[in-house]
Image (cartoon, coloured by chain):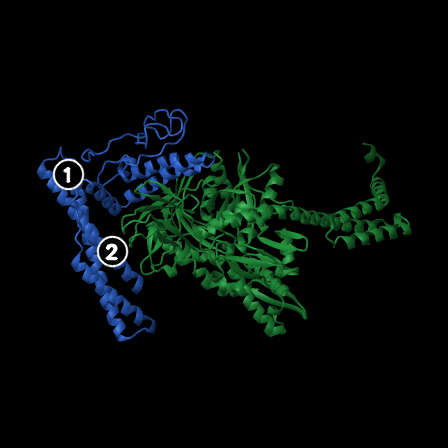
Amino acid sequence: MSRIVGIDLGTTNSLVAFMDKEGPHVIPGPDGQTKVPSIVGLTDNGLIVGEPAKAHLIRDPSRTIYSVKRFMGKGLDDVKDELKYFPYQLHEKNGVIRIEIGDKTYSPPQVSAMILKELKRRAEEYLKEDISRAVVTVPAYFNDSQRQATKDAGLIAGLEVLRIINEPTAASLAYGLQKKTQGLIAIYDLGGGTFDISILKLQNGIFEVLATNGDTHLGGDDFDQRLVDVLVDDIFHTQGVKVGAYPDLMQTVRLEAERVKVRLSDEIQTMAVIDLPNGTYEKMWTRENMETLVMDLVDRTLAPCRHALKDAGLTASQIDEVILVGGSTRMPLVWRKVEELFGKKPHSELNPDEVVALGAAVQADILGGHTKDLLLLDVTPLSLGIETMGGVMSALIRRNTTIPTSAKEMFTTYVDGQTSVDIHILQGERELVKDNRSLARFQLKLPPLPAGVPRVEVSFLIDANGILHVTARDIRTGEAQSVQVKPSHGLTDDEVEVMIRDSFQFAAEDIKVRQVIEARNEANAIIVATEKALVRGTHLISDKETASIRRILQQLGDVKAEDDHRLIRTKITEVEKVTHHLAEMLMDATLKEALESKKLSDVIK
Amino acid sequence: MDHQQPTTSTARQLPMARSMCWHCQSEVTGEYLCGQCVKVQPLSKDLDYFACFQLPRLLSINEQQLEQTFYELSRTFHPDFYSTKDESEKAISLGNSAFLNAGYRTLKDPIQRAEYLIRLEAGAVKDIRSNPPADLFEEVLELQEDLETFRQLAPNGGSSELEALRKKLQDKRDRLEKRQAEMEASLQSQFKQWDLLQGLPPLSSQAREEKNSLLHDMQEILSHRTYVRNMVNDLLETTG
C-alpha cells in the first residue's frame, strides 16, 4: 500500500508532510523551502504554482490567483465586500464562484487542485514513489460546502482525500505526539485567512475535541489589507500616485505590506520601500502603528474563544495549556491578547507554520494503520438543521456534537395524493433560515396516498470528515430511497468529473511549463558562471575565443526568454562546448597557483 | 423487556444486530468483531445507551466509567481504524460510532440522561403525558412581547421607557433563574428517589404505582424546565 501524506492547504502557504518511524516530517522543495506559496499563475504556456507564481503576481497580476481558499464553497454574494481587493475577475455559476484568468475560467476547487498537484509532485520526488492518497486539513470552522469543495479539489488533483481534518486538531496531534502534551488545552489558530479556536481534552492517546469556534474570514490577509489601505492613501498624498490605477503596483504594495508586517513581529520599527513610476516611496513604520491598525481585528478573535469555552463548559482558568498555531500568531499583539484572555502565557514550541502539516501526517499514519495508540474525536463546528414553516430553522444536530453523528426525521404529507416534499438543509446558529448557510436542497418522493399516511424517514449523517450524507427510507415498505441532493454552493458530481478529465489534459501542458522553468533556471546559472569565468580568465584565451563565447552567451540570454525548453537546452549545450577550453585553462591556472603557493614538500606529501 | 434489573453485562458483551456474522456467516459470540473473519459487527437496534456503556439504568452514574467505556469503544468502532477496509465494514463502523457518540452525549448530561431514561421507561408506562404548562405559556407570550419592545427601543438608547423595561426584564430574569435552580434541585431529589426504587425487590402494585407517578412528576418538571431555560436564554441574548 502506498504511503498516505498529510497536506496543509493554507490560504497563503501550503505544505506536505509524511510520517516514518522517527515521526512526522515536512517535505522540503529543491530549494530547501517547506512552504509552497498558495499562488497559481497562468502564463502563455500553461500554469505555474508556488514561488515562481509569486514573482508572476507582480508581472501579470490579472492572471495570478492567490488566497483562493477564501472562495472555497462560496457564492459571489459571500465575498462581494472584498471583490475590489482582487486583481482578477470573478463571477458565479450554479452557486459556485468562478475565477476568470486570461480566456480560461476556473472554479476554486480547480485552483486548489493545482496547488495540491504541486505538493503531490513534491512528495513524489522526495519519497521516490507514487502518491495517491492524502489527509487534507481545513479550518475547524469550515462548513459542509467548504469541506466538500476541499474534497473535490483533491479528486481533481488525482488524490483520494481519505480524511478532511481540522487544522487546530491536527496541531494538537503533533503536540500530543512530539511534546507529550496532556490535559485540557486550547489551540488558538490564526492563519492567513481564517481563525479557529479549539478546546481539547488530551488523555492517554485520546484527543477529544470539546468545542470549537472561529471565523473563516479573518486572518493575516486582513492585517495586510489594513496596511495596504494606509500605504495607498499615503502614497497618493505624498507622491500623487494613484496605486489603484496600476494592478502590478498594487501587488507590489501588498507584498511590501506583508513584508513590513512580518518584520514588525521581530523589530520595533522598519522601513517600507516601494518603487513608484516617479521615484521611490519610503516610510518608517513602528510596531505600535501596526498594532493600532489591526487591534480591532485581533479583538475579533476573542469572542469565539469565549464561546468555545462556554460550549466546553469550562472557564479560562481551567485550561492547562494555550498553544498558538498559524503564521499570524507571530505578532506580539496576539500573544498579549491571548494571555490576557486565558490568564496564562501561551506557547508555540513547534513551528507554527509547519505544525498543522505535521499533524496531518500523524493522522495519515493513523489511517494507514501504523499509529494505533492515538485517536482523534472531533466535533461538527456548526448546527445542522432543516427549514420549517415560517422560514425558521429547526436544528437536528447541534454544534460541537462529536462526529460521526446522525439524526433522523420523519416526513409525511399534508394534502391527499401529494407526491413530494421539498427539503432545505441549513447550517448555522441563527433562528431564521435567511441568517443561516444554505447547504443543499432536495425533493423527497412520496407515494400518492391520503394525507398523513406516507411515512418517509430521512437520515442526516455527518461523517468523520464533517461532511453530510443524506439517505431516505420508506417506513411502510422498508425500502431505501435514493436522494439527489443539490448543493447550494458546490460543484455537482458531473462537474467534478469533467474537471478531473480536464485536469489530466492540462497535465501535459503543465509538464511543458515545468520543463521551461527548469531549463531557464539552468540557463541563468550557466550565464552567471560563464560571466564570472570570463572575468577571471579572459587573459588565458584569445580575443577571438572570448568574442565567440560572448556571442553564444548572448544567444542563450535571448532564447531563455522564450518558452521553448528544447531551444534553451540546445544553447546551454553550445555554451558548454564553446567554454570547454576556457574551463580547462582556468583549471590549469588554478592548479598552478595552488602549486606555486606551496613548497614541494607540501605537494608530494 | 425487563427493566427492573440493572444491566450487568460485562465488557465486550454488547448485543449485536445478528447472531451470525454478516460476512462469513459464522456464529458471533457476543464480541464486536467476528471471531472467524475479524470483521466488525453492527450493534443491535434494540441496544439502549445504558446497556451500550455497561451502566445500570440509574440516574446517577459513574461518570469516569462512562468516559472510560466511551474511549474504549471508540477505539474499537471509530472510522479512522476502518479507512482502508471495504465499504460494508466502513458503513458499520460509521453507524456504530454515530450510535456511540449519541449515547455518550446523552448520558453525560444529567438532564438529557433523565429525559432519555423517561423515554425508555415510558415504553412500559403508556399513560405518561406532560400537560402543557398553561401558566408558563402566558409568561412566554408576555416575555416575547417585552423583548420585542426592548429590541425596538434599544438602538435609540437611554430613554426612561427603555430603562424601566430593562429593570423589569432583569427582575424577570432573576425570578426565572431562581425558578430554574429550584426545579433542578427538586429533580435532583427525584433522581435519587428513582434510583432507590430501582434497588427494591420485584415490584408490588404499590411500588409500581409509586414509580409511575415519579416518572410522571419528573417528566413534568423536565418539560417546564425547558420552557424556563429557553426564556432565560432569550433574555440573555437580547439584554446581554
Quarter of the image with the C terminus of chain A in it: top right
* Direction from residue B95 to residue B58 in the image, left or right: left
For image coordinates 34% across by 24% down, the residue present is: B27
Corner quadrant of residue A474: top left
Q: Nearer the viewer, residue A587 or A93?
A: A93
Residue located farthest toward the left when viewing the structure as drawn: B206
Corner quadrant of residue B151: bottom left
How far across and how far down the image is residue A49, in percent? 62, 51
Q: Amino acid at mark 1?
A: Leu
Q: Amino acid at mark 2?
A: Arg
Q: Nearer the viewer, residue A32 or A376?
A: A376
Total marks placed:
2
Residue underneath mark 1: B197
A379 in relation to A60, above or below: above
Residue underneath mark 2: B229
For disc 1, the chain is B
Label 1: state its secondary structure. Answer: helix
* Residue B17 in sight from this viewpoint: yes
How far across and how far down the image is residue A257, in percent? 57, 62
Chain A color in figure: green
Chain appearing in blue on the rendered image: B
Q: Nearer the viewer, residue A454 or A396?
A: A454
How far across and how far down the image is residue A422, in percent? 37, 54
